[in-house]
Amino acid sequence: MNFLKNMKIGSRLFLGFGLLITLTLTLSSLEYFFMKNIGKEVDIITEDRMVKSNLLRDIRDHLNENVRTVRDIILLPSDKRQEKQDLMKIIEATTNNSADIYKHLDNIIKFGKGRELFEQLLDIRKQYGVTINQALAYALDGTDEQATAFLFNDVAKIQKIYFATLGELIDYQQKNLHEAKGDTASYISEALFWTILLSIFSAILGVLIAWLLTRSVTAPLSLALSSAQRIGEGDLRGTIDVDSRDEVGQLLTAMRDMQSSLTRTVVTVRDNAESVATASIQIAQGNADLSSRTEEQASALEETSSTMTQLGMTVKNNADNARQADQLAKNASTVAQQGGEVVNDVVETMKTINESSHSIADIINVIDSIAFQTNILALNAAVEAARAGEQGRGFAVVAGEVRNLAQRSAEAAKEIKNLIMASVERAGQGSELANKAGETMQQVVISIRQLTDTVAEISSASAEQATGVDQVGIAVNQMDQTTQQNAALVEESAAAALSLQEQADLLVKAVSVFKVSGDRSSVTAPRFPSQLSSPKVMLPAVSGATHSGDWTSF
């Protein structure tokens, strides 16, 4: 059996059928040999032995007829010459026929005892012919008594010898005929024996070859079928033993390589899915931190709004009470200094907002990178599943879904990134406005110091201060809108993180159907809390503000 395992299936079939064909040819050759010998014996019987026996019987029949005719001629009265002449014609005809038969026998009896007996028969035939002619001469001459005596003496003696020699030759030919028949029967029996023996041997060998060929093919095919069913059920823990180099052995080797490749792919996808789930938790934590920072920004904006309201009232009072220059100048100087400090606080707050925006952008970049890596891993998994063929179709569908989710996550991350970049740009504009506000406050201080120069300059400075306060209010409103947008982006980022975690959980469950060597009893992805609270920042309305209608709560 071991040598069959290393042979190609075609070679096995060629060897098996070759042996059967060889046996068939051997059986056919043996049958041809026996049939040829039987045919020769039949030819000897039909063309030699039977012909000789039949010809000798014909001679005996002619001889008997001649004996009867001669007897009739001798026994007829002498006055019946015409009847005797008619009988002579019969003798002449039978004699001629016998002569033809003797010529034929002389050509076919050539050797052995048969030739010796035939030579004796020829000699006796000559003597018999002379004796018969003498008896006929007596009968035709009218000497009936002498002819009768000659018939019963000389003719009877030679006739007896003639019949005895002819009978001996006939018996010899009959013996040869029976021997030929016996040889033919022996050949037939021997042919039947060897034909039956080789037929039984061929049948046994054919059954043995069929059993060996069937077992050498069906056993590894059964192993391949059970392995394919096991892999189809997701069990990758079994081993596929290959102990042959034929086509089925090559199939088992390919299945073993496929199982190893599929095992590596499942382990890689499972680990990556768990990594994505862990990263989604980190993203959620980052969103929580971002929410906290957004609340801090809202609080800072609330303080800034209150301060700007006070500054506006101070500037108006300064314009209305320009006549009270000294006292108002002192008050304005104090208020201007406070305003400068507040503006510095605003500048610092804007820097903090700018830094937070950059941090958010970094987090979004991390999200985008994770989505890109997930997309690459899903693409690799799809390629491996395509290589696996029909067995990897289900896994290819799962890999495609993961890839789609990764692409959606990447697109969401890009949108968030664009919004964050816009927020950073607006925060920069707010910082520039705050710097301008600081410069304006410095001009206010200088204007107050120069209050004694002219009331007109005080009025002009007050107007410029009012304009600067309006610009600061607009900047604060823009900061408020930016903060609201940041809060919305935080909500979207949290929702995206939750969706990413859920998809990672589904991916882990999808690959958990596969069982690999050293596998854990259960594989579950980390899960988020059942609900992620959306960050909500409440800004109370500021009473008495000039642009209070532009503020919204979020």
Image (cartoon, grey):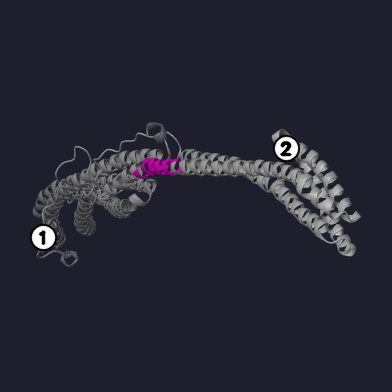
State the image quarter where residue 31 is shown. top right
Q: CA distance from mark 2 to mark 1?
A: 151 Å
Q: Nearer the viewer, residue 132 or 170?
A: 132
Q: Nearer the viewer, residue 356 or 169?
A: 169
Q: What residue is shown with label 1?
A: 538
Viewer-nearest of discs 2 and 1: 2
Question: Is label 2 in contact with label 1 (beta carbons under 8 Å)?
Answer: no
Q: What residue is shown with label 2?
A: 117
Q: Quadrant of the N terminus?
A: top left
State the image quarter where residue 261 is shown. top left
Q: Secondary structure at mark 1?
A: loop
Q: Is residue 454 visible?
A: no
Q: Position of residue 396 (x, y in %)?
A: 33, 51
Q: Position of residue 76 (x, y in %)?
A: 82, 61
In the displayed structure, does residue 414 sit left or right of residue 60?
A: left
What residue sits 24% from the left and 48% below the top? 511
Q: Position of residue 206 (x, y in %)?
A: 44, 43
Helix, strand or loop for the magenta stretch, by majority: helix
Residue type, label 1: Met
Decide: few, some or many residues near mark 2? Use Cα within 10 Å; few <14, some 14-19, many ≥20. some
In the displayed image of the protein, which residue is found farthest to the right? 141
- Residue 215 within the segment the image draws in magenta: yes
- Residue 66 within the segment the image draws in magenta: no
Decide: few, some or many residues near mark 1? Use Cα within 10 Å; few <14, some 14-19, many ≥20. few
Question: Which residues fall within the magenta stretch?
Answer: 201-218
Q: Secondary structure at mark 2?
A: helix
In the displayed structure, does residue 525 sit left or right of residue 392?
A: left
Residue type, label 2: Leu
Q: Is residue 175 visible?
A: yes
